[in-house]
């Protein structure tokens, strides 16, 4: 019986560590959702469900919404990561623009996508 309890605890610990993804504490909820939406758009392109032009248009529409994101003071603990999310989404837009113009690459976009995923504590590809 004790072995089963210990085994159950170990399994639960492994499961919970594997599920450690989710919003980091030092990013606003709005920035987190903003970043997730950008990942979703880029993943649509990376999975060949939409064209680079469509993805860029969606990302550009998303970046136009960045003005509605909450502003944080420079000294705020979440300022750096909030700014980082906005910057990474802008860089995704740039990478998609390059691809749409024939000068970008799938690998560069994937790398940029993974940088945002890491910042958001989400799964890399």
Image (tube, rainbow, N blue to C red):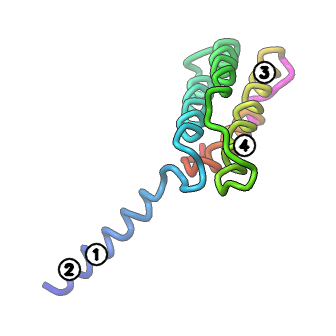
User: Would residue 15 appear left or right of 98 to someone viewing this image?
Assistant: left
Residues at marks 2 and 1 touching, judged by CB atoms closer than 8 Å: yes
User: Distance of mark 4 from mark 3, alpha carbons?
Assistant: 25 Å
Q: Residue 76, position in %: x, y?
A: 68, 54
Residue found at the very far bottom of the displayed protein:
2
* 96 to 36, vertically: above or below: above
Per the image, the residue denoted by label 1 is 9
106 is within the stretch colored magenta: yes
- Secondary structure mostly seen in the magenta stretch: loop
Residue at position x 68%, y 24% in the image: 63
Q: Residue 8, position in %: x, y?
A: 24, 73
Assign the C terminus to one quadrant of the image: top right
Dot in front, 4 or 3 = 4
User: Distance of mark 2 from mark 1, alpha carbons?
Assistant: 6 Å
User: Would residue 1 appear left or right of 22 to someone viewing this image?
Assistant: left
Dot in front, 4 or 1 = 4
Per the image, the residue denoted by label 4 is 83
Of pointers 3 and 1, the one earlier in the residue sequence: 1
Residues at marks 2 and 4 touching, judged by CB atoms closer than 8 Å: no
Of pointers 4 and 3, the one earlier in the residue sequence: 4
User: Distance of mark 4 from mark 1, alpha carbons?
Assistant: 39 Å
Residue at position x 55%, y 36% in the image: 36
Classify mark 1: helix, strand or loop: helix
Question: What residue span does the magenta drawing correspond to?
Answer: 102-107
96 is within the stretch colored magenta: no
**Dot 2: within a 10 Å radius of its alpha carbon, few (fewer than 14), some, or many (20 or more) residues?**
few
**Dot 1: within a 10 Å radius of its alpha carbon, few (fewer than 14), some, or many (20 or more) residues?**
few
């Amino acid at each position: 019986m004790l072995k089963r309890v210990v085994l159950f605890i170990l399994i639960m610990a492994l499961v919970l560590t594997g599920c450690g993804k989710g919003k980091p504490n030092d990013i606003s909820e709005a920035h987190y959702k903003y970043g997730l939406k950008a990942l979703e758009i880029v993943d649509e392109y990376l999975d060949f469900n939409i064209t680079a032009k469509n993805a860029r248009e969606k990302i550009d529409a998303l970046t136009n919404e960045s003005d509605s994101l909450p502003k944080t003071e420079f000294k705020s603990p979440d300022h750096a990561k909030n700014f980082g999310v906005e910057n990474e989404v802008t860089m995704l837009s740039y990478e998609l623009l390059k691809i749409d113009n024939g000068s970008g690459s799938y690998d560069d976009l994937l790398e940029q996508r993974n940088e945002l995923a890491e910042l958001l504590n989400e799964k890399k590809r």
